[in-house]
Amino acid sequence: MKNILLLGIFIASIALASGVLAISKPAPESSAVSKGSTTDKRGIFSGVIEKVDETGATIVVTGKKMMEVKTLIFSIDNKTKITKSRSSIAPQDLKKGMSATIEYHQNAGTLTAIIIDVSAP
């Protein structure tokens, strides 16, 4: 009977000790947060295309964001999906004056378009 009581106390103390260790040990941080690097931020911006560079690598769009008129420059890469009336178009088909809604991600200050949906002015 004494052995069973001692065994119970021993098991209870191990359970208590492991619970205390689990509480006091912080969870590991993700590598992006712990290194202090900037994380991707996603957003949507709507406006009018002001300029398309000759190679189709960037577009300049002016629109309102948070009640303020802003002009933003978006990079276009080979992953960017561009549509007009639900049909795919090439970056070279983007023209000044088109209305555009851009879904983008921001990384280290660079805005890269993920999806660009345009309509004629």
Image: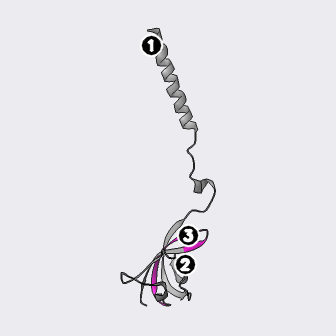
Q: Position of residue 30 (x, y in %)?
A: 56, 52
> Could you tell me if residue 74 is visible in this image?
yes
Marks 2 and 3 in Cβ contact (< 8 Å): no
Residue drawn where x is 54% and y is 65% of the image: 40
Which amino acid type corresponds to the residue marked 1 in the rendered image?
A: Ile
Circle 1 SS class = helix
Mark identifier at residue 106: 3
x then y, percent, for residue 60? 55, 83
Q: Secondary structure at mark 3?
A: strand
Q: Residues within 10 Å of mark 1 (few under 14, many from 20)?
A: few
Residue at the spot of label 1: 4
- Residue 66 shows in this picture: no
Q: Considering only order in the chain, which callout, 1 or 2, is on the residue closer to the N terminus? A: 1
Mark 2 vs 1: CB contact within 8 A: no
Secondary structure of residue under mark 2: strand
Q: Residue furthest right?
A: 36
Query: Which mark identifies residue 74?
Result: 2
- Residues at marks 3 and 1, CA–CA distance in whole angstroms: 63 Å
Q: Whole-Å distance between the Cαs marked 2 and 3?
A: 10 Å
- Crowding at dot 3, Cα within 10 Å, few <14 / some 14-19 / many 20+, comes out as some
Say which quadrant the C terminus sits in. Answer: bottom left
Per the picture, the main secondary structure of the magenta-coloured stretch is: strand
Identity of the amino acid at label 2?
Answer: Phe
Q: Who is closer to the viewer here, 109 or 62?
A: 109
